Image: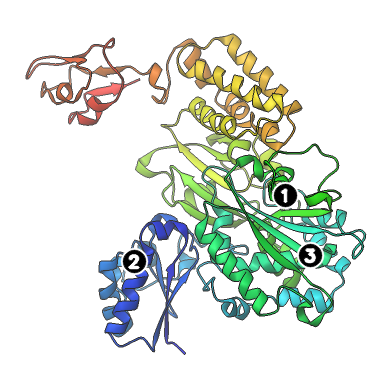
Amino acid sequence: MYRSHVMICGGTGCTSSGSDKVAAAFEAEIVTAGLENEVKVIRTGCFGLCALGPIVVIYPEGTFYSMVKPEDVAEIVNEHLLKGRPVIRLLYNETVAEDNSIKSLDETSFYKKQKRIALRNCGVINPENIEEYIAFDGYAALGKALTEMTPDEVIQVVLDSGLRGRGGGGFPTGRKWQLACADRGKVEKYVCCNADEGDPGAFMDRSVLEGDPHSVIEAMAIAGYAIGADQGYVYVRAEYPIAVNRLSTAIQQAREYGLLGKNIFGTDFSFDIDIKLGAGAFVCGEETALMTSIEGMRGEPRPRPPFPAKKGLFGRPTILNNVETYANIPQIILKGADWFRSMGTEKSPGTKVFALGGKIKHTGLVEVPMGTTLREIVEEIGGGIPGGKKFKAAQTGGPSGGCIPASLIDTPIDYDNLMEIGSMMGSGGLIVMDEDTCMVDIAKFFLEFTVDESCGKCTPCRVGTKRLLELLEKITSGNGTMRDLERIEELAQFIKENSLCGLGQTAPNPVLSTLQYFRDEYLAHIQDKRCPAGVCKALLTYKIDESKCRGCTLCARACPAGAINGSVRNPHNIDTLKCVKCGACMETCRFGAISKG
């Protein structure tokens, strides 16, 4: 038994910030202090506050240290672990009261409105130790399903819970399982997990696999029992090495403990899981393209119907859910449908994990009940916009979603509300934008991504998105016309209605939503040849305010094009024909004399 546990974030974010070096320093300092039999160092999953990594939490106190460096470790060991005195200067500031007493994490703005179900074990257990997962009720749901419930009863509980797919479409999970459950024991079937997660800025599924891989394994086995499948596949992108390694370790451990393989829990149910690595193609997030890729072919979507529940992987009935969806299943089986429905909204029960990024103080992972407003996520949990800037919009659903304007910041977030305002839940990426963001440029950014990621199988997506991008580029370069806006809307609707799969069908969403809520910015680009946010380079003009210019010549010396004229101690001016609009002059000026517009 250890008196203290030092939990160090081993997720991708903190690892990239040097948490491995921090962990090694702790291990060395603990030995030096003679505490190796009293204190255990554990590399765990993501705590959520990615902006403050590397993160170290010491139990049993729950003391939360942020932005820890290897050189800080000796002080923490000597003061905290040896003398029982937390190092105040290294603590997450919101956990320190005015009298220097330590508050719990649940009292901080980032955590107090969260409800962690999918993320329940992330930051709590060692993801590479199956016994720690078991200690937190791991595999109890699988045992309950196999020994106390029939397959149909399992499906009914999932149906009654109202759990909807967390991968984007929001299709009822129990209904999907129900469609695939016919002919158990007579037809070969498969259970698949989509861990490809291609949305820019999304890292929810990766974090679950890094911090709690056994929850996905357990849920897939439960799904296999429910529909009558004995084989599962996790399709995970190769760019997630930590997630892949931990998932591989977890699968091997589950096999060794008899929780995967033949006759699980002494029953006649057998189930195993293999990993298939994806090459990072966004289109493989679409279920039929993903299955085609698992089969060893180029990842391209297939026409539907038939749907995968009837004819999926290798032509057999298949269910596919994403990582977050599966992570909810064990808790639903253990605690019941009513417990799950006690959270969230009537049509969207439970919680949702969001990867909060962009112009926000607290970037990271948050899990909140469905129906939480965008304002609560941005201003309270996220800590608001840095630098005193104003909130302008939030993008949900990645390249398939839409932009939500500040006027709708009090919208409760669930599947139906987001669809009503022209956006969508998607897998859970939530990108916050401030007043310095050009919404035309944002639409162009997401469309560039879609054009690059289109598999090219159908003409509306392959050609249509490219033509749509060309129209946006025309507008941001200052050559757009009012007729171009009409063309954009016509083409966007055509792409939505005629593309083969969800990638093409949703590709115009960022364009249409920005046109709906920020049409004035499009008009400014077209009619005034001006970018209100000062982002679109072709429409920028740099000016020097003569009343503020001191004639210090710094801007002239910084200009790479020799576009600034003037003598010492006299106001300068910019030759707009020579100006390359690099912004070096504005960055150099000490007197705020240079503006852009």
Front-most of residues 274 and 534? 274
Measured as percent of width and height from the top left, residue 278 is found at 61, 49
Provide the residue designation for mark 1: 295
- Name the residue type under label 2: Lys
Crowding at dot 2, Cα within 10 Å, few <14 / some 14-19 / many 20+, comes out as: some
Q: In the rendered structure, which disc, 2 or 1, sits on the residue that comes first in sequence?
A: 2
- Name the residue type under label 3: Gly
What whole-number distance in Å separates the C-alpha atoms at marks 3 and 1?
Answer: 19 Å
Q: Residue at x 48, y 54 (%)?
A: 364
Q: In which quarter of the image is residue 40?
A: bottom left
What whole-number distance in Å separates the C-alpha atoms at marks 2 and 1?
Answer: 40 Å
Q: Which mark is residue 172?
A: none
Q: Residue 224 carries which label?
A: 3
User: Can residue 138 be spotted in the picture?
Assistant: no
- Mark 2 falls on what kind of element? helix
Q: In the rendered structure, which disc, 3 or 2, sits on the residue that comes first in sequence?
A: 2
Vertical placement of 105 versus 538: above or below?
Answer: below
- Name the residue type under label 1: Glu
Q: Residue at the far left: name it.
A: 568
Contact check, label 2 and label 1, Cβ < 8 Å: no
